[in-house]
Image: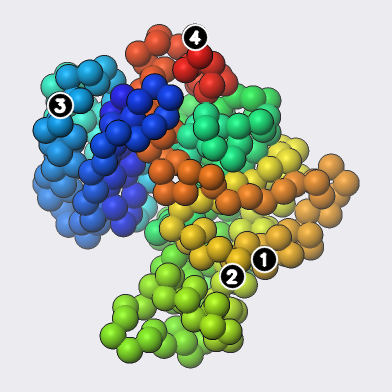
Amino acid sequence: MAALDVGGTKIAGALIAPDGRILKRALRPTPAKEDETVLLATLAEVLGELQSTPLWPEVRAVGVGSTGPVDAAAGTVSPVNIPGWRSFPITKEVGRLSGGLPVRLVGDAVAMAMGEHWCGAAREASNALCMVVSTGVGGGLLIDGRIHSGPTGNAGHIGHISVEISETLCVCGARGCIEQAASGPAITRTALALGWKPPQGEEATAQAVATSARQRNKAAIAAFDRAARALAAGVAATAHLLEINLAIIGGGVAEAGAVLFEPLRAHLQEYATLPFATPCQIRPAALSRDAGLVGAAAAALAIDQERPWPLSPVREAVTR
């Protein structure tokens, strides 16, 4: 299967075997501030690199996981972090660029949930929240062993749940969103506002903030603590609402490791206070940044095997 993972920072592509192994990769930076023409050309480059391999003739469907909001039914995307795409017909364009192959669109965090349930940290889970924490913050839900994507494919879009009082508008137009505190750019902004400076010669990024936090820089630690608190509030709200017992955190910010996960687990104990929510565990994504690609491939596999949608459970699609 072919898979695309469209994010605010990068557009990744892969050819993936029926057992979830990645056979070929392609990657381009997302020209997020450019217009639709440039964005489409970048998408075409990624697909073109995959099509140039001898494996391409074996591809029978394409799965697309995209930052959102998405409209899976209409096949369009309007990502808050990619302003050049508004109601962009990505399913139609990927179908055209791939030579008429069938295409299925899912949200990036829904794709992550599918990937982690297929062959990652949620393999044995029945009720879980999977979060992508990167340029933005998204979520995908596994409920009673089934991927729950909602009517338009946006169920679990936890990044735009409000968890704090704020006068600053989020990119979505609301205030106090998890994404305002926990995304990579938000962590960087917080650290800079608290007096942190990147090491000489380095860019101000969440990765650089994480490095400083590991070196015990107080501003960097505080920035990650604020992010962790916002994430914990969102996880706890989901646990109280849906009785999930597992939250999996992936995306570029999750690669910070202990500087994120230690305060996240500590804050979760403060927020998940009711007896049915306290057992909720936090785990890093086992597939790391590949979770979205693997999950998008699972969506493509469902097309090929004519499985009902939403997929249930993902592993059934590769064993039948």
Label 4 SS: loop
- At a point 39% along the width and 32% down the height, the residue shown is 21
Name the spot of residue 274 as percent of width and height, x first. Answer: 86, 49
Residue 101 — which label? none
Pointer 2 residue: 259
Kind of residue at badge 4: Arg
Q: In this view, does 11 lie to the left or right of 132?
A: left
Q: How far, Cα to Cα, is label 3 from label 2?
A: 42 Å
Give above or below for 284 relative to 221.
above
Pointer 1 residue: 262
Kind of residue at badge 1: Glu
Q: In the rendered structure, which disc, 1 or 3, sits on the residue that comes first in sequence?
A: 3
Q: In which quarter of the image is residue 13?
A: top left
Q: How far, Cα to Cα, is label 4 from label 2?
A: 41 Å
In the rendered structure, are the residues bearing label 1 and label 2 in contact, judged by CB atoms less than 8 Å apart? yes
Name the spot of residue 19 as percent of width and height, x first. Answer: 43, 24
In the rendered structure, are the residues bearing label 3 and label 2 in contact, judged by CB atoms less than 8 Å apart? no
Of discs 3 and 2, which sits in the foreground?
3
Kind of residue at badge 2: Val
Label 2 SS: helix
Front residue (pair 241, 46):
46
Label 1 SS: helix
Pointer 4 residue: 320
Q: How far, Cα to Cα, is label 1 from label 2?
A: 6 Å
- At a point 56% along the width and 28% down the height, the residue shown is 147
Name the spot of residue 238 as percent of width and height, x first. Answer: 68, 45
Q: Residue 108, can we see it? A: no
Pointer 3 residue: 54
- At a point 32% along the width and 78% down the height, the residue shown is 203
Q: In the rendered structure, which disc, 4 or 3, sits on the residue that comes first in sequence?
A: 3
